[in-house]
Amino acid sequence: MFTNSAEQNHHNDHQVIELFQLDRTRLDSLQQKLNTPPRLLSKSAGRPTCSIFKIPQSFVAVNGKHLYYPHIVSIGPFHRNEPHLQMIEEHKCQYLSQLLTRRSDLSLETLFKSLQPLEKWARESYSEIIHLDEHEFVEMMVVDGCFVVELFRKVSRLVRFEADDPISSMSWIFSFLLRDLLRLENQLPWFVLERLLEVTGTENERSLGWSLATLSLNFFSYSVENLDAGKFHHLQGKHLLDLLRNAFIPQELETRQRDLNHTNTPSHVIHCVSKLRRSGIRIRPKTADSFLSLDFRHGVIEMPMLTIDDFMSAFFANCVAYELSHKNCSTYITTYATLLDCLVNSAKDVEYLSDHNIIENYLGTEAEVANFFNNLGKDVSFEVQRCYLAKMFNDVNHYYENSLHVHWASFRYTYFRTPWSFISAVAALVLLILAVLQTVYTMIPYYKN
Protein backbone atom coordinates (compact mmCIF):
# COMPACT_ATOMS: atom_id res chain seq x y z
CA MET A 1 0.00 0.00 0.00
CA PHE A 2 2.82 2.40 0.91
CA THR A 3 4.59 1.63 -2.36
CA ASN A 4 1.45 2.30 -4.38
CA SER A 5 0.92 5.67 -2.59
CA ALA A 6 4.51 6.78 -3.26
CA GLU A 7 4.22 5.80 -6.90
CA GLN A 8 0.96 7.76 -7.17
CA ASN A 9 2.55 10.91 -5.64
CA HIS A 10 5.53 10.60 -7.98
CA HIS A 11 3.14 10.23 -10.89
CA ASN A 12 1.18 13.37 -9.79
CA ASP A 13 4.38 15.42 -9.45
CA HIS A 14 5.45 14.29 -12.87
CA GLN A 15 2.03 15.28 -14.16
CA VAL A 16 2.31 18.81 -12.72
CA ILE A 17 5.73 19.31 -14.27
CA GLU A 18 4.46 18.17 -17.63
CA LEU A 19 1.50 20.58 -17.49
CA PHE A 20 3.77 23.66 -17.13
CA GLN A 21 5.66 23.98 -20.40
CA LEU A 22 7.79 27.10 -20.89
CA ASP A 23 6.74 29.24 -23.86
CA ARG A 24 10.06 30.25 -25.34
CA THR A 25 8.45 32.79 -27.66
CA ARG A 26 6.78 34.58 -24.74
CA LEU A 27 10.02 34.61 -22.77
CA ASP A 28 11.89 36.11 -25.71
CA SER A 29 9.18 38.76 -26.08
CA LEU A 30 9.43 39.69 -22.40
CA GLN A 31 13.21 39.84 -22.59
CA GLN A 32 12.92 42.21 -25.55
CA LYS A 33 10.60 44.48 -23.51
CA LEU A 34 13.12 44.49 -20.64
CA ASN A 35 15.84 45.64 -23.01
CA THR A 36 13.71 48.37 -24.64
CA PRO A 37 13.89 51.84 -23.04
CA PRO A 38 10.57 53.57 -22.22
CA ARG A 39 9.01 55.51 -25.08
CA LEU A 40 6.07 57.29 -23.43
CA LEU A 41 7.94 58.47 -20.33
CA SER A 42 11.69 58.77 -20.69
CA LYS A 43 14.23 58.62 -17.88
CA SER A 44 14.78 62.36 -18.22
CA ALA A 45 11.20 62.99 -17.03
CA GLY A 46 12.29 62.51 -13.43
CA ARG A 47 15.29 64.84 -13.67
CA PRO A 48 15.33 68.56 -12.83
CA THR A 49 16.45 69.29 -16.40
CA CYS A 50 13.10 68.04 -17.78
CA SER A 51 10.58 70.87 -18.04
CA ILE A 52 8.26 70.14 -20.99
CA PHE A 53 5.69 67.44 -20.26
CA LYS A 54 2.76 65.69 -21.82
CA ILE A 55 -0.49 66.62 -20.06
CA PRO A 56 -1.90 63.76 -17.90
CA GLN A 57 -4.90 62.23 -19.65
CA SER A 58 -7.01 62.61 -16.50
CA PHE A 59 -6.59 66.40 -16.79
CA VAL A 60 -7.54 66.35 -20.48
CA ALA A 61 -10.60 64.20 -19.76
CA VAL A 62 -11.85 66.63 -17.09
CA ASN A 63 -10.91 70.02 -18.55
CA GLY A 64 -10.96 69.29 -22.30
CA LYS A 65 -8.39 69.31 -25.09
CA HIS A 66 -9.01 72.97 -25.93
CA LEU A 67 -7.06 74.10 -22.85
CA TYR A 68 -3.96 72.00 -23.48
CA TYR A 69 -3.53 71.27 -27.20
CA PRO A 70 -2.44 73.87 -29.80
CA HIS A 71 -5.13 75.21 -32.11
CA ILE A 72 -3.12 76.94 -34.83
CA VAL A 73 0.65 76.49 -34.43
CA SER A 74 2.95 73.66 -33.35
CA ILE A 75 6.09 74.60 -31.41
CA GLY A 76 8.42 71.74 -30.50
CA PRO A 77 8.10 68.02 -31.28
CA PHE A 78 4.92 66.90 -29.48
CA HIS A 79 2.42 68.21 -32.07
CA ARG A 80 4.76 68.38 -35.06
CA ASN A 81 3.15 67.63 -38.45
CA GLU A 82 -0.43 67.47 -37.16
CA PRO A 83 -2.73 68.22 -40.13
CA HIS A 84 -4.75 71.06 -38.57
CA LEU A 85 -1.56 72.99 -37.74
CA GLN A 86 -0.08 73.13 -41.23
CA MET A 87 -1.25 76.64 -42.12
CA ILE A 88 1.28 78.36 -39.86
CA GLU A 89 4.06 75.94 -40.95
CA GLU A 90 4.24 77.90 -44.20
CA HIS A 91 4.53 81.18 -42.30
CA LYS A 92 7.37 79.76 -40.19
CA CYS A 93 9.40 79.35 -43.36
CA GLN A 94 8.42 82.84 -44.52
CA TYR A 95 9.61 84.36 -41.23
CA LEU A 96 12.89 82.46 -41.46
CA SER A 97 13.34 83.65 -45.07
CA GLN A 98 12.65 87.26 -44.04
CA LEU A 99 15.24 86.96 -41.25
CA LEU A 100 17.93 85.65 -43.63
CA THR A 101 17.11 88.36 -46.18
CA ARG A 102 17.34 91.09 -43.57
CA ARG A 103 20.56 89.69 -42.11
CA SER A 104 22.75 88.97 -45.14
CA ASP A 105 25.60 87.89 -42.85
CA LEU A 106 23.45 85.02 -41.52
CA SER A 107 22.93 81.65 -43.17
CA LEU A 108 21.07 78.43 -42.43
CA GLU A 109 24.44 76.82 -41.77
CA THR A 110 25.20 79.41 -39.08
CA LEU A 111 21.84 78.78 -37.37
CA PHE A 112 22.24 75.00 -37.49
CA LYS A 113 25.78 75.12 -36.10
CA SER A 114 24.69 77.43 -33.27
CA LEU A 115 22.02 74.99 -32.07
CA GLN A 116 23.69 71.64 -32.76
CA PRO A 117 25.70 71.70 -29.46
CA LEU A 118 22.38 72.15 -27.58
CA GLU A 119 20.64 69.19 -29.24
CA LYS A 120 21.25 66.61 -26.49
CA TRP A 121 20.46 69.06 -23.72
CA ALA A 122 17.26 70.10 -25.50
CA ARG A 123 16.10 66.47 -25.88
CA GLU A 124 16.41 65.99 -22.12
CA SER A 125 13.98 68.87 -21.61
CA TYR A 126 11.13 66.70 -22.93
CA SER A 127 9.42 64.02 -20.88
CA GLU A 128 9.11 61.62 -23.82
CA ILE A 129 11.67 60.19 -26.21
CA ILE A 130 11.63 62.29 -29.38
CA HIS A 131 11.75 60.10 -32.49
CA LEU A 132 13.63 62.55 -34.70
CA ASP A 133 17.20 62.13 -35.81
CA GLU A 134 19.79 64.78 -34.97
CA HIS A 135 19.34 66.77 -38.18
CA GLU A 136 15.51 66.72 -37.97
CA PHE A 137 15.59 67.79 -34.32
CA VAL A 138 17.98 70.70 -34.96
CA GLU A 139 15.92 71.74 -38.00
CA MET A 140 12.79 71.81 -35.84
CA MET A 141 14.56 74.02 -33.27
CA VAL A 142 15.78 76.42 -35.96
CA VAL A 143 12.45 76.77 -37.79
CA ASP A 144 10.21 76.92 -34.70
CA GLY A 145 12.62 79.00 -32.64
CA CYS A 146 13.23 81.59 -35.34
CA PHE A 147 9.48 81.91 -35.89
CA VAL A 148 8.92 82.66 -32.19
CA VAL A 149 11.81 85.14 -31.94
CA GLU A 150 10.84 86.92 -35.16
CA LEU A 151 7.18 87.08 -34.08
CA PHE A 152 8.25 88.71 -30.80
CA ARG A 153 10.40 91.22 -32.68
CA LYS A 154 7.54 92.15 -34.99
CA VAL A 155 5.06 92.54 -32.13
CA SER A 156 7.55 94.77 -30.26
CA ARG A 157 8.06 96.78 -33.51
CA LEU A 158 11.76 96.04 -33.75
CA VAL A 159 10.96 94.56 -37.16
CA ARG A 160 8.02 95.50 -39.36
CA PHE A 161 5.25 93.10 -40.28
CA GLU A 162 4.92 92.54 -44.00
CA ALA A 163 1.99 94.46 -45.47
CA ASP A 164 0.02 91.31 -46.27
CA ASP A 165 1.00 89.29 -43.18
CA PRO A 166 -2.24 87.63 -41.94
CA ILE A 167 -0.82 87.26 -38.42
CA SER A 168 -1.00 91.04 -38.00
CA SER A 169 -4.07 91.70 -40.15
CA MET A 170 -6.35 88.89 -38.89
CA SER A 171 -6.98 89.35 -35.18
CA TRP A 172 -8.30 85.83 -34.60
CA ILE A 173 -4.94 84.33 -35.65
CA PHE A 174 -3.03 86.53 -33.19
CA SER A 175 -5.42 85.60 -30.34
CA PHE A 176 -4.83 81.89 -30.93
CA LEU A 177 -1.06 82.43 -31.16
CA LEU A 178 -1.08 84.09 -27.73
CA ARG A 179 -2.71 81.04 -26.18
CA ASP A 180 -0.82 78.41 -28.19
CA LEU A 181 2.59 79.78 -27.20
CA LEU A 182 1.92 79.22 -23.50
CA ARG A 183 0.62 75.64 -23.69
CA LEU A 184 2.89 73.21 -21.84
CA GLU A 185 3.11 70.63 -24.65
CA ASN A 186 3.90 73.39 -27.15
CA GLN A 187 7.24 74.69 -25.89
CA LEU A 188 10.91 75.01 -26.82
CA PRO A 189 13.51 75.12 -24.05
CA TRP A 190 14.36 78.65 -22.93
CA PHE A 191 18.07 78.27 -23.72
CA VAL A 192 17.25 77.46 -27.37
CA LEU A 193 15.33 80.72 -27.79
CA GLU A 194 18.09 82.63 -25.98
CA ARG A 195 20.74 81.25 -28.31
CA LEU A 196 18.71 82.16 -31.39
CA LEU A 197 18.06 85.68 -30.09
CA GLU A 198 21.78 86.08 -29.46
CA VAL A 199 22.81 84.79 -32.89
CA THR A 200 20.18 86.70 -34.88
CA GLY A 201 20.19 89.90 -32.81
CA THR A 202 21.75 93.25 -33.72
CA GLU A 203 23.74 95.83 -31.78
CA ASN A 204 20.83 98.27 -32.08
CA GLU A 205 18.48 95.70 -30.58
CA ARG A 206 20.83 95.09 -27.64
CA SER A 207 21.46 98.80 -27.09
CA LEU A 208 17.71 99.36 -26.72
CA GLY A 209 17.72 96.94 -23.78
CA TRP A 210 15.54 94.21 -25.26
CA SER A 211 16.08 90.80 -23.67
CA LEU A 212 14.24 87.56 -24.39
CA ALA A 213 12.21 88.12 -21.22
CA THR A 214 11.09 91.63 -22.18
CA LEU A 215 10.27 90.56 -25.75
CA SER A 216 8.27 87.57 -24.53
CA LEU A 217 6.34 89.43 -21.82
CA ASN A 218 5.66 92.34 -24.16
CA PHE A 219 4.04 89.79 -26.50
CA PHE A 220 1.90 88.30 -23.70
CA SER A 221 0.97 91.76 -22.39
CA TYR A 222 -1.64 91.90 -25.17
CA SER A 223 -3.66 89.40 -23.09
CA VAL A 224 -2.46 90.20 -19.54
CA GLU A 225 -3.46 93.54 -18.04
CA ASN A 226 -0.84 95.66 -16.24
CA LEU A 227 2.04 93.40 -17.25
CA ASP A 228 5.06 95.72 -17.29
CA ALA A 229 7.63 93.83 -19.36
CA GLY A 230 10.34 96.38 -18.55
CA LYS A 231 10.42 95.29 -14.91
CA PHE A 232 11.49 91.75 -15.84
CA HIS A 233 14.57 92.35 -17.99
CA HIS A 234 16.62 89.66 -16.22
CA LEU A 235 13.77 87.22 -15.50
CA GLN A 236 14.41 83.62 -16.54
CA GLY A 237 12.27 80.56 -17.15
CA LYS A 238 12.46 76.99 -18.33
CA HIS A 239 10.27 78.01 -21.29
CA LEU A 240 7.68 80.67 -22.17
CA LEU A 241 4.98 79.27 -19.88
CA ASP A 242 7.38 79.19 -16.95
CA LEU A 243 8.55 82.74 -17.71
CA LEU A 244 4.99 84.12 -17.57
CA ARG A 245 4.35 82.09 -14.42
CA ASN A 246 7.46 83.55 -12.77
CA ALA A 247 6.33 87.07 -13.68
CA PHE A 248 3.25 86.56 -11.48
CA ILE A 249 5.23 85.36 -8.44
CA PRO A 250 6.27 88.34 -6.26
CA GLN A 251 9.41 88.14 -4.15
CA GLU A 252 7.40 88.44 -0.92
CA LEU A 253 5.88 85.00 -1.51
CA GLU A 254 9.31 83.37 -1.38
CA THR A 255 9.77 84.82 2.12
CA ARG A 256 6.31 83.65 3.16
CA GLN A 257 7.12 80.15 1.93
CA ARG A 258 10.33 80.04 4.01
CA ASP A 259 8.46 81.15 7.14
CA LEU A 260 6.04 78.19 7.00
CA ASN A 261 8.05 76.20 9.55
CA HIS A 262 7.37 78.88 12.15
CA THR A 263 3.58 78.80 11.89
CA ASN A 264 0.84 76.33 12.73
CA THR A 265 -0.14 74.63 9.50
CA PRO A 266 -3.81 73.96 8.71
CA SER A 267 -5.33 70.52 8.40
CA HIS A 268 -7.70 71.55 5.59
CA VAL A 269 -8.44 74.39 3.20
CA ILE A 270 -11.19 76.97 3.60
CA HIS A 271 -14.94 76.92 2.99
CA CYS A 272 -16.89 78.42 0.10
CA VAL A 273 -17.91 82.07 -0.12
CA SER A 274 -21.48 81.45 1.07
CA LYS A 275 -20.36 79.68 4.26
CA LEU A 276 -17.65 82.24 4.96
CA ARG A 277 -20.16 85.06 4.70
CA ARG A 278 -22.45 83.34 7.20
CA SER A 279 -19.56 83.21 9.66
CA GLY A 280 -18.86 86.93 9.24
CA ILE A 281 -15.85 86.65 6.92
CA ARG A 282 -15.90 89.21 4.13
CA ILE A 283 -13.95 89.33 0.86
CA ARG A 284 -12.87 92.63 -0.61
CA PRO A 285 -10.52 93.70 -3.41
CA LYS A 286 -7.01 95.05 -2.88
CA THR A 287 -4.42 96.66 -5.10
CA ALA A 288 -1.34 94.53 -5.83
CA ASP A 289 1.02 93.72 -8.68
CA SER A 290 0.05 90.04 -8.66
CA PHE A 291 -3.23 88.19 -8.09
CA LEU A 292 -1.24 85.80 -5.85
CA SER A 293 -0.80 88.45 -3.12
CA LEU A 294 -3.63 87.66 -0.69
CA ASP A 295 -4.08 88.67 2.97
CA PHE A 296 -6.47 87.98 5.84
CA ARG A 297 -6.97 90.67 8.49
CA HIS A 298 -9.73 91.12 11.08
CA GLY A 299 -12.19 88.83 9.37
CA VAL A 300 -11.54 90.16 5.84
CA ILE A 301 -9.88 88.26 2.98
CA GLU A 302 -8.18 90.77 0.70
CA MET A 303 -7.77 89.59 -2.91
CA PRO A 304 -6.49 91.44 -5.99
CA MET A 305 -8.84 91.41 -8.96
CA LEU A 306 -8.45 88.47 -11.33
CA THR A 307 -9.51 88.73 -14.97
CA ILE A 308 -10.64 85.32 -16.17
CA ASP A 309 -10.94 84.76 -19.92
CA ASP A 310 -9.84 82.24 -22.56
CA PHE A 311 -6.17 83.22 -22.17
CA MET A 312 -6.07 83.07 -18.37
CA SER A 313 -8.05 79.82 -18.26
CA ALA A 314 -5.43 78.22 -20.54
CA PHE A 315 -2.67 79.75 -18.41
CA PHE A 316 -4.10 78.33 -15.17
CA ALA A 317 -4.72 74.86 -16.61
CA ASN A 318 -1.24 74.53 -18.11
CA CYS A 319 0.51 76.00 -15.06
CA VAL A 320 -1.19 73.50 -12.74
CA ALA A 321 -0.13 70.64 -15.02
CA TYR A 322 3.44 72.02 -15.16
CA GLU A 323 3.78 72.55 -11.40
CA LEU A 324 2.54 69.03 -10.66
CA SER A 325 4.88 67.47 -13.25
CA HIS A 326 8.18 69.28 -12.69
CA LYS A 327 10.40 67.81 -9.99
CA ASN A 328 11.61 71.01 -8.32
CA CYS A 329 8.80 73.42 -9.17
CA SER A 330 6.94 75.52 -6.60
CA THR A 331 3.14 75.31 -6.54
CA TYR A 332 1.98 78.93 -6.28
CA ILE A 333 -0.50 78.77 -9.16
CA THR A 334 -1.82 75.38 -8.03
CA THR A 335 -2.35 76.77 -4.53
CA TYR A 336 -4.25 79.77 -5.88
CA ALA A 337 -6.35 77.56 -8.18
CA THR A 338 -7.17 75.33 -5.20
CA LEU A 339 -8.22 78.40 -3.20
CA LEU A 340 -10.66 79.43 -5.94
CA ASP A 341 -11.93 75.87 -6.17
CA CYS A 342 -12.72 76.04 -2.46
CA LEU A 343 -14.24 79.53 -2.54
CA VAL A 344 -16.48 78.80 -5.51
CA ASN A 345 -19.12 76.13 -4.99
CA SER A 346 -21.87 77.55 -7.16
CA ALA A 347 -22.78 80.30 -9.61
CA LYS A 348 -23.89 82.46 -6.65
CA ASP A 349 -20.37 82.41 -5.25
CA VAL A 350 -19.00 83.61 -8.60
CA GLU A 351 -21.70 86.28 -8.76
CA TYR A 352 -20.68 87.55 -5.29
CA LEU A 353 -16.98 87.69 -6.27
CA SER A 354 -17.87 89.50 -9.52
CA ASP A 355 -20.10 92.00 -7.74
CA HIS A 356 -17.28 92.77 -5.28
CA ASN A 357 -14.62 93.24 -8.01
CA ILE A 358 -12.66 90.09 -7.15
CA ILE A 359 -13.32 88.38 -10.49
CA GLU A 360 -13.73 90.11 -13.83
CA ASN A 361 -15.50 87.50 -15.92
CA TYR A 362 -14.99 87.30 -19.68
CA LEU A 363 -15.09 83.49 -19.81
CA GLY A 364 -18.82 82.82 -19.82
CA THR A 365 -21.70 82.57 -17.37
CA GLU A 366 -21.17 82.41 -13.61
CA ALA A 367 -21.97 78.70 -13.76
CA GLU A 368 -19.29 78.13 -16.43
CA VAL A 369 -16.68 79.94 -14.32
CA ALA A 370 -17.62 77.89 -11.26
CA ASN A 371 -17.41 74.70 -13.32
CA PHE A 372 -13.97 75.71 -14.64
CA PHE A 373 -12.42 76.26 -11.22
CA ASN A 374 -14.06 73.15 -9.74
CA ASN A 375 -12.73 71.00 -12.60
CA LEU A 376 -9.28 72.58 -12.27
CA GLY A 377 -9.07 71.25 -8.72
CA LYS A 378 -9.90 67.65 -9.67
CA ASP A 379 -7.15 64.99 -9.60
CA VAL A 380 -4.75 67.55 -8.09
CA SER A 381 -2.44 66.35 -5.33
CA PHE A 382 -2.18 69.30 -2.99
CA GLU A 383 -0.20 69.63 0.25
CA VAL A 384 -2.04 72.28 2.22
CA GLN A 385 0.58 72.18 4.98
CA ARG A 386 3.37 73.32 2.64
CA CYS A 387 1.60 75.86 0.41
CA TYR A 388 2.28 79.59 0.54
CA LEU A 389 -1.29 80.28 1.78
CA ALA A 390 -1.01 77.86 4.73
CA LYS A 391 -1.03 80.63 7.35
CA MET A 392 -4.01 82.35 5.74
CA PHE A 393 -5.94 79.05 5.62
CA ASN A 394 -5.13 78.51 9.30
CA ASP A 395 -6.25 82.03 10.30
CA VAL A 396 -9.47 81.84 8.27
CA ASN A 397 -10.38 78.44 9.73
CA HIS A 398 -9.67 79.67 13.28
CA TYR A 399 -11.90 82.70 12.71
CA TYR A 400 -14.59 80.52 11.12
CA GLU A 401 -14.66 78.14 14.10
CA ASN A 402 -15.07 80.95 16.65
CA SER A 403 -18.66 80.41 17.88
CA LEU A 404 -19.25 84.07 18.76
CA HIS A 405 -18.40 85.20 15.23
CA VAL A 406 -20.51 82.45 13.70
CA HIS A 407 -23.66 83.11 15.78
CA TRP A 408 -23.55 86.89 15.37
CA ALA A 409 -22.79 86.69 11.67
CA SER A 410 -25.49 84.07 11.14
CA PHE A 411 -27.99 86.35 12.86
CA ARG A 412 -27.01 89.29 10.65
CA TYR A 413 -27.01 87.12 7.51
CA THR A 414 -30.49 85.75 8.29
CA TYR A 415 -32.27 88.94 9.40
CA PHE A 416 -30.39 91.84 7.82
CA ARG A 417 -29.30 90.50 4.42
CA THR A 418 -32.05 92.27 2.42
CA PRO A 419 -34.40 95.22 3.13
CA TRP A 420 -37.39 92.86 3.29
CA SER A 421 -35.77 90.54 5.83
CA PHE A 422 -34.76 93.63 7.86
CA ILE A 423 -38.34 94.97 7.79
CA SER A 424 -39.67 91.55 8.80
CA ALA A 425 -37.19 91.35 11.68
CA VAL A 426 -38.11 94.86 12.88
CA ALA A 427 -41.83 94.08 12.64
CA ALA A 428 -41.35 90.87 14.64
CA LEU A 429 -39.36 92.79 17.25
CA VAL A 430 -42.07 95.46 17.52
CA LEU A 431 -44.74 92.79 17.94
CA LEU A 432 -42.66 91.10 20.61
CA ILE A 433 -42.23 94.38 22.51
CA LEU A 434 -45.96 95.14 22.25
CA ALA A 435 -46.81 91.65 23.49
CA VAL A 436 -44.50 92.10 26.49
CA LEU A 437 -45.98 95.53 27.26
CA GLN A 438 -49.49 94.15 27.00
CA THR A 439 -48.61 91.37 29.41
CA VAL A 440 -47.05 93.85 31.85
CA TYR A 441 -50.02 96.24 31.78
CA THR A 442 -52.41 93.30 32.22
CA MET A 443 -50.61 92.10 35.35
CA ILE A 444 -50.10 95.51 37.01
CA PRO A 445 -53.77 95.82 38.27
CA TYR A 446 -53.58 92.29 39.62
CA TYR A 447 -50.53 93.10 41.75
CA LYS A 448 -52.09 96.39 42.90
CA ASN A 449 -55.19 94.57 44.17
Image: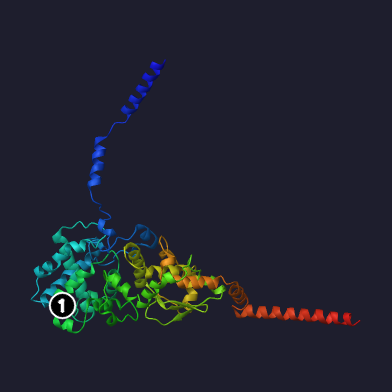
Q: Which of 340 and 407 lies nearest the eye of the viewer?
A: 407
- The quarter holding residue 116 reads bottom left
**Can you say which quadrant of the picture contains the C terminus?**
bottom right
Residue 98 visible in image: no
Q: Against 121, is 229 above or below?
A: below
Q: Pointer 1: what residue?
A: 201
List x then y, in percent, for residue 371: 44, 66
Residue located at (23% from left, 48% from top):
36
Q: Is residue 75 left or right of residue 293?
A: left
Query: Dot 1: what SS?
Result: loop
List x then y, in percent, for residue 117: 14, 65
Residue situated furthest left in the rendering: 105
Q: Is residue 190 left or right of residue 317?
A: left
Q: Is residue 205 left or right of residue 330?
A: left
Q: Which of 365 and 207 lies nearest the eye of the viewer?
A: 207
Residue located at (29% from left, 73% from top):
243
